[in-house]
Every structure is written in structure tokens, then in C-alpha cells.
Image: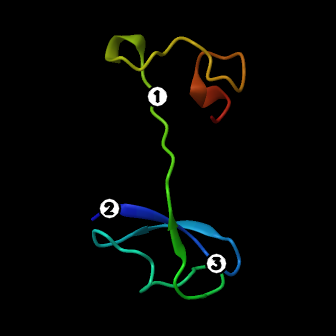
Amino acid sequence: MPIYEFRCNKCGHRFEKLCTMGENGEKINCPACAAPAPKRVMSGFCACGTENDGGGGGSSCGSCSSSNCGSCGH
């Protein structure tokens, strides 16, 4: 079962939900305001790693000068 990301049409709240394959949001409600049928949105993702596994570690993440993404939270 995939995790899909939704945005409420009424209050704009974004949330994730474990759903059946192909769920479009018609059968769920917003957890913040209970409005029906939130819109499914594209989710972004981030991959971190080291140079040895192809992740390109050792350089900063762009948000700070650290070489460790965990130090700045990005």
C-alpha cells in the first residue's frame, strides 16, 4: 500500500495517508478540518548518502556550510 500526499481544498492542510493503490482522495477527509475529498498532490523526496554508495556525500546540502545534512535539518 503506497503513502500518498494530499492537500485540503478548504483549509490547505497538507498530509500523508497510507492508501490503496490509485486512491484519489474522494473517500477520505482532511484530518485538520474534516472537509471531504482533498486533492492528491505530487510528493517530493530527498536521498542522502555517501560517495561510496553514489549519494555524493561530502559536499554541503546547499542550506549551510556543513558536509553533514543532519546538522542543519535539511
Amino acid type, callout 1: Cys
Q: In the rendered view, does 18 fall on the left or right side of 30?
A: left
The residue closer to the viewer here, 2 or 22, is 22
Q: Amino acid at mark 3?
A: Asn
Q: What secondary structure is marked by label 3?
A: loop
Q: Which residue matches tag 2?
A: 2
Secondary structure beneath disc 2?
loop
Q: Which mark is residue 48?
A: 1
Which is in the foreground here, disc 3 or disc 2? 3
Looking at this view, is 74 or 22 the one in front?
Answer: 22
Q: Find residue 55 and report its image quarter.
A: top left
Residue position marked by numbered label 3 in the rendering: 9
Indicate which label's residue lies in the foreground, 1 or 3.
3
Residue 67: percent from the left, percent from the top? 60, 15
Amino acid at pointer 2: Pro
Q: Earlier in the sequence, mark 1 or mark 2?
A: 2
Sooner in the amino-acid sequence: mark 3 or mark 2: 2
Task: Judge whether 37 appears above or below 23 on screen.
Answer: below
The residue located at (28%, 68%) in the rendering is 21
Q: Nearer the viewer, residue 3 or 66?
A: 3
